Image (cartoon, rainbow, N blue to C red):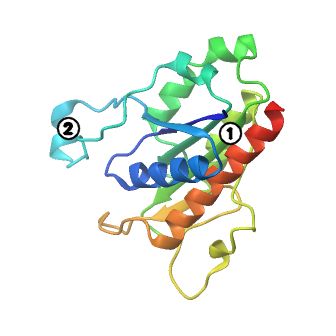
Amino acid sequence: MTKVLVLYYSSYGHIETMARAVAEGARAAGAHADIKRVPELVPLDVAEASHFKLDQPAPVAEIDDLRHYDAILIGAGTRFGRMPAQLANFLDQAGGLWEEGALNGKVGGAFTASATQHGGQEATLLSMIANLMHFGMVVVGLDYGFSGQMAIDEITGGSPYGATTITGPDGSRMPSANELAGASYQGMKAAQLAARLAR
């Protein structure tokens, strides 16, 4: 059975919610999907004062976990047009896997969130995809088979580079049904491709 890892960082729960949708899509394609998160780097008192969502049930990943999956989809919110330090710090520790070629040929993908419609989502996705390509991975975006990303009758995320959501300036907007459908679609496509490549 194809194994998919959905690896994420989420300060306020938006990306955590998207990660569940990505995993659901992978499972719908017949894959086994695990959801794990990267370690928090912010001191606990700062995280509490900033109202971070600290009750996330996903286990914290170890770098060596990455070698055991056929597909790895990474998600995190934008930090001024790039991935946040928590995810970057985790991926920076994968030098040994890179040196071994342990991730070569695996399927990868990225998803993100921002406060505003044009808050650096595509730049952030590209910053994550660059890491995946350096690891030798085959990248799956959100292709136009998911027509929801072309919707103009509602405010919605979605990009050919990966699934996205918009949180609103105060973080009160959670992922919409359309955005979750996009995340699920991306997870399904990644699992399907990983299964084909494993044949």
11 shown above or below 173: above
**Residue 26, position as x, y percentages in the image:** 60, 47
The CA distance from mark 1 to mark 2 is: 32 Å
Q: Is residue 81 left or right of residue 174?
A: right
Residue depicted at 56% across the width and 88% down the height: 153
Neighbour tally class for label 2: few under 14, some 14-19, many 20 plus, Cα within 10 Å: few
Of the pair 146 and 10, the residue shown nearer to us: 146
What is the quadrant of residue 48 in the picture?
top left
The residue type indicated by label 2 comes to: Val
Where does the image place residue 132, in percent across and percent down from the top left? Answer: 69, 35
Foreground of the two, 164 or 179? 179
The secondary element bearing badge 1 is classed as strand
Mark linked to residue 174: none
Residue drawn at 63 percent across, 15 percent down? 95
Residue 56 visible (yes or no): yes
Q: Amino acid at mark 1?
A: Gly
Nearer the observer, 180 or 90: 180
Count every numbered label the image shows and give the total: 2
Secondary structure of the residue carrying numbered label 2: helix
Q: Tell me where residue 130 appears, x and y as whole percent.
A: 70, 38
Residue closest to the eye, 135 or 3: 3
Task: Residue at 64%, 72% (x, y): give it.
Answer: 149
Q: Please determine whether, in this image, residue 190 is positioned above or below residue 86.
A: below
Instruction: Report which residue position mark 2 lands on.
Output: 46
User: Quadrant location of the C terminus?
Assistant: top right
Where the N terminus falls, by quadrant?
Answer: top right
Residue 7 falls left or right of residue 192: left
Q: Which residue is mark 1?
A: 108
In the rendering, at what x and y percent does residue 104 appear? 77, 24
Residue 78 appears in view: no
Q: Are marks 1 and 2 in contact (CB under 8 Å)?
A: no
- Crowding near pointer 1: few (<14 within 10 Å), some, many (20+)? many
